[in-house]
Amino acid sequence: MPGLLYLLGYLVVVTLVAYFPTHRLLQGWARRGGVGSEKCD
């Protein structure tokens, strides 16, 4: 049973560590204009 708890904890931690920096990066990118912000004449 400790192995199952370790696995669940690992999956939660890895998901959060991957999600939050990506989320913050994309928020900042979207705030600056994101894709399509440059004008094509």
Image: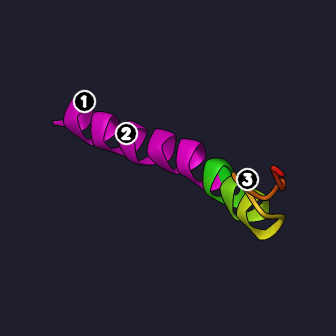
Q: Residue at x 30, y 34 (%)?
A: 7
Residue span colored magenta: 1-20
Q: Position of residue 21 (x, y in %)?
A: 68, 50
**In the image, farthest residue toward the left:** 1
Q: Nearer the viewer, mark 1 or mark 3?
A: 3
Instruction: Identify which amino acid the numbered label 1 is placed on.
Output: Gly
Question: Mark 2 or mark 3, which is nearer the start of the sequence?
Answer: 2
Disc 1 versus disc 3: distance between alpha carbons? 33 Å
Quick check: 15 left or right of 19?
left
What residue did someone put label 2 on?
A: 11
Q: Check if residue 13 falls in the magenta segment.
A: yes
**In the image, farthest residue toward the front:** 41
Q: Position of residue 3 (x, y in %)?
A: 24, 30
Quick check: 3 left or right of 25?
left
User: Is residue 11 placed above or below 41 in the rendered structure?
Assistant: above
Disc 2 versus disc 1: distance between alpha carbons? 12 Å
